[in-house]
Every structure is written in C-alpha cells, then in structure tokens.
Image: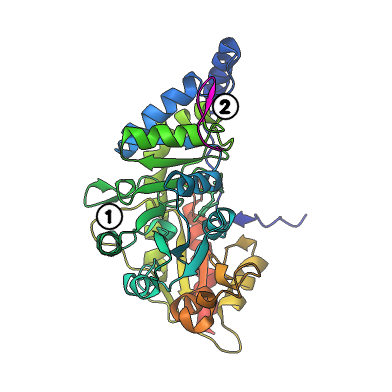
C-alpha cells in the first residue's frame, strides 16, 4: 500500500493536557458560572497581567472585537494611519468604527510601518496611528511615539502576533495608548478564540471592561453603547492552563526557527528577516522572501512545489489589505504609495512553524526549497 504523505500546515495549535482541562471543567460545573466575569476570568486576567508584565489587561472573546473596542475606548474618529501588510481585521476594525483607513508603506527590514511614511500621511483629520507588530517584529516604537506626541495622535498597536515579545527587557505591550492581542487558534498563545487589550491606568481598564459588557457600569446604569465581547469561563480556564507551558513552547519554536535559518542561509534567491537586536522574540512565524524569478522558480512556483509535497505554507500577507474591494479605491491604497508592501507581498511565504513540528520535517521542507532554488 502506498504510504500517505503527511500534510503539514503553516501552524498547529497547542492544546492544554486534556486531563487538566477536565479538572477545570469540573470546577466550572461546580461553580455553575460559565461567563460574565466569573472566577476563571478574574484569575486569568491576573495571571496574564503578571506573565506579560503589564499594568492592566481586559480579556475579550476575540482579537477583532478587542480592536473594535480599543478604538471606541479612545473615541477615535476621522482618519487613522495603518499598514496594508497585515491581516484584514486590522483595517476592518477601523471601517466598522466609520474611520477612514489611510495606508502608509512598510519599511523593508522588519516589514512594520515606516515612521517616515506615517509622518507624510498625516492630515488635519488624522487622529491616531494603528501599527502592527507584524510576525511579532516590534514596530519602531520610539519613533512612532515621537510622531504621535508631536501631532497629538493616539497610538493603538495591533499586537495580535506579539504575545510575550519584549524589547530591551520591557514588554512590547507597554507601548502605545493601548495594545491589542489575539488568542486565536493560529496564534502563539491561544484560548481557541480570544483576545485582550492592555491598558496602562485603572480608569481606562474600567472603561474597556464596561465597553465589552454592553456598556453596563452597574446593574442599572448603561453609560455608553457597548458590545458583547466577553471571554467565557471555558476559554479563561483553558488560557490559564496554556500559560503554564507557553515559555517551553516558545523555546521549541526558537529551535525550529534556528534550524530553518541554518539550513537556508546560503540559498540563492531566498532571504529571511534579520534578527531584531535586543528583543525576546516569540517566533510566531517564519517568513522567507523569494527574490529569484525565472521559468522554474518564483514565489508562487515554490509555494505550489511545497503544496505538491503536502507542505501548506501561507503567503501572509498577500494580497495586501489595500488591494481588497472595500479599500482599493482609497487614495492611499494606490500602488505607487505602497511600493515596499507590494514588493514583499509578491515575494513572501511563511513556512510551517509550531512547537510540535518535527525537526526532521523542518529538514525536509528546507531540502525541497534548496532543490527548487537550484533550478
Ligand atoms: C494582525 C492581526 N490582527 C487582528 C487579528 C484578529 O484576531 P482574531 O482572529 O482573534 O479576531 C489577527 C488574527 O486573526 C491578526 O493576525
């Protein structure tokens, strides 16, 4: 019988040990509290605050609702400068708040918003900047802060990829007015679906907590039109268990990332992003850029070659958000405004990386790439 080729996806979620989760479920069944700021929710927020070394955290049912609520919490209106090189939820969160997204280009080393391009995009209607720590790579936060201060703009970081990343010993989530996380199944740290907003003072945390619960301040007071974005007790209990193992699993990701770097370092036409100095990374993604283009080799040819071998990399982030119908007619979406983003979107493949990925498979994937690049 022919051996079936295993199928490898770009990521695979880590789940907590089932016996431990059953114990948590038993406690939930005993408590009879399944949502609405129950004991697991409270414990999870406290544990996350300590783990990420931040002042305040509000957990959410998913990252998109956290982004929508972060914009509401700061009462952002008008235009917001953001990146086209991200997952669509970043821009959708602006659109749902009736804010006009203004795309600025990314810089070529780490693929985050280029501060010089941000400054050029500011108009009298600009109220905020929403950069993304894409692949967990920190944005140029000091420069962005200076621009924000100079022009009196708010900064909301989309930190969906950046769980636990530290810069010079400081949590990345301490930067900006708010920092928004996703705990979706595809992320380094998952609560199946989930997300969070990191805030820096207790009044803001309270405000965010009201917003995610319909705007209720107490039993009889609804001070503003909030939404239902609460994390339930099952997700919070699951997340608490995930926190126990996250550091070990980020360590495993690093081993895989190092192995790819070593295997692919001298392959002509294949580049990867430089290590960011002074950061503790989370190794959320392993993007490579393919600069060779001929009859046999191109990004899409390599992408398809990998699929032929059962390896499902992803062309994150292609197409650019600015190319999608809801946004493509914006002036800032014009190709000439976004040359770096267009170039990178045409060259990138994210290779499989997740803690359970066998190192022999990393070797196989690298070999397929090396053989293909020889052509
Ligand atoms: C950059 C970015 N922002 C926002 C989101 C939305 O998060 P969620 O899927 O938890 O709603 C995601 C991922 O899904 C993302 O990758």
Q: Residue furthest right?
A: 1
* Quadrant of image for the N terminus: bottom right
Q: Which residue is mark 2?
A: 234
Q: Which residue is mark 1?
A: 279
For residue 12, side relative to residue 79 (left or right): right
First to last magenta residue range: 216-226
Q: Is residue 46 magenta?
A: no
For residue 208, side relative to residue 165 (left or right): right
| 177, above or below 45, in the image | below
According to the image, what is the colour scheme of the structure?
rainbow
Q: Return the mark for residue 116.
A: none
| Residue at disc 1, secondary structure | strand
* Residue situated in front as seen by the camera: 276 or 175: 175
- Residues tagged 1 and 2 counted as in contact (Cβ below 8 A): no
Which percent across, then down, holds residue 161?
45, 52
For residue 188, side relative to residue 142 (left or right): right
Q: Earlier in the sequence, mark 1 or mark 2?
A: 2
* Residue situated in front as seen by the camera: 235 or 95: 95
Which percent across, then down, holds residue 306?
60, 68
């Amino acid at each position: 019988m022919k051996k079936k080729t295993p199928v490898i996806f770009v990521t695979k979620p880590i789940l907590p040990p089932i016996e431990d989760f059953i114990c948590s479920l038993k406690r939930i069944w005993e408590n009879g509290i399944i949502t609405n700021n129950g004991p697991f929710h409270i414990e999870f927020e406290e544990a996350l605050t300590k783990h990420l070394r931040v002042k305040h955290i509000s957990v959410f049912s998913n990252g998109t609702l956290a982004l929508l609520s972060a914009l509401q919490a700061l009462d952002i209106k008008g235009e917001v400068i953001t990146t086209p090189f991200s997952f669509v939820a970043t821009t959708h969160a602006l659109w749902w708040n009736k804010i006009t997204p203004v795309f600025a280009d990314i810089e070529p080393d780490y693929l985050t918003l280029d501060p010089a391009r941000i400054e050029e995009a500011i108009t009298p209607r600009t109220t905020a900047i929403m950069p993304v720590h894409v692949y967990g790579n920190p944005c140029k936060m000091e420069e962005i802060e200076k621009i924000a201060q100079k022009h009196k703009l708010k900064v909301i970081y989309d930190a969906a990829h950046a769980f636990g990343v530290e810069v010079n010993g400081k949590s990345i989530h301490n930067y900006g007015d708010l920092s928004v996380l996703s705990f979706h199944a595809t992320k380094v740290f998952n609560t199946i679906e989930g997300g969070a907003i990191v805030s820096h003072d207790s009044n803001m945390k309270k405000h965010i907590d009201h917003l995610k619960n319909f705007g209720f301040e107490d039993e009889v007071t609804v001070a503003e039109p909030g939404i239902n974005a609460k994390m339930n007790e099952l997700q919070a209990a699951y997340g608490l268990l995930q926190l126990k193992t996250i550091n070990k699993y980020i360590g495993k990701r690093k081993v895989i990332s190092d192995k790819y770097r070593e295997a692919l370092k001298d392959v002509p036409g294949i580049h990867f992003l430089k290590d960011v100095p002074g950061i503790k990374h989370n190794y959320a993604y392993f993007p490579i850029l393919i600069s060779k283009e001929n009859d046999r080799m191109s990004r899409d040819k390599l992408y398809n070659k990998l699929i032929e071998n059962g390896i499902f990399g992803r062309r994150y982030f292609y197409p650019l958000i600015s190319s999608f119908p809801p946004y493509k007619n914006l002036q800032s979406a014009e190709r000439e405004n976004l040359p770096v983003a267009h170039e990178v979107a045409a060259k990138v493949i994210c290779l499989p990386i997740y803690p359970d990925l066998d190192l022999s498979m990393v070797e196989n994937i690298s070999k397929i790439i090396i053989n293909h690049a020889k052509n």
